[in-house]
Image (cartoon, rainbow, N blue to C red):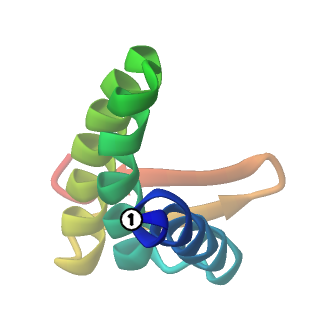
């Protein structure tokens, strides 16, 4: 019982932090998708709803990036993405 309540969420948070530090997009998406049920259970519905939007948007960006429909451009202000079929 205490493994499901304490250990699994802690390990999930550790996976999320690892994905953020290593910039591992597939691991980040997996961790956010798994954390969504905890947000609903804790009553943080706004976070959970935002996560669904975040997952849809990032999955689309990752799909475009890996299939080379998108060009990544680094600027001093941050990253920008340009669609190649424009």
Residue 32 or residue 44, whichever sits in front: 44
Give the tally of numbered discs. Answer: 1
Extreme residue toward the right, this view = 76
Q: Is residue 57 left or right of residue 7?
A: left
| Quarter of the image where the N terminus is located | bottom left
Residue 34 or residue 30, whichever sits in front: 34
Q: Is residue 41 left or right of residue 67?
A: right
Residue 28: percent from left, percent from top: 45, 67
Above or below for 24 versus 82: below
Extreme residue toward the front, this view = 1
Identify which residue is drawn at 39% across, 26% down.
Answer: 50
Identify which residue is drawn at 21% across, 46% down.
Answer: 86
Q: Is residue 52 left or right of residue 19?
A: left
Residue 74: percent from left, percent from top: 67, 64
Residue 5: percent from left, percent from top: 46, 57
Mark 1 burial class by Cα count in 10 Å: few <14, some 14-19, many 20+: few
Residue 67 or residue 51, whichever sits in front: 51
Secondary structure type for disc 1: loop
Q: Is residue 28 left or right of residue 37?
A: right
Identify which residue is drawn at 44% across, 53% down.
Answer: 81
Residue 59: percent from left, percent from top: 24, 57
Residue 63 or residue 47, whichever sits in front: 47
Name the residue tied to disc 1.
1
Residue 29: image quadrant is: bottom left
Above or below for 73 versus 55: below
């Amino acid at each position: 019982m205490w493994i499901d309540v304490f250990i699994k969420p802690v390990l999930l948070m550790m996976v999320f932090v690892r994905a953020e530090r290593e910039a591992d997009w597939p691991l980040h998406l997996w961790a956010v998708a798994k954390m969504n049920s905890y947000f609903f259970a804790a009553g943080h519905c706004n976070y959970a709803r935002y996560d669904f939007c975040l997952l849809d948007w990032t999955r689309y960006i990752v799909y475009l990036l890996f299939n080379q429909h998108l060009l990544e451009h680094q600027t001093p202000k941050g990253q920008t993405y340009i669609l190649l079929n424009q």
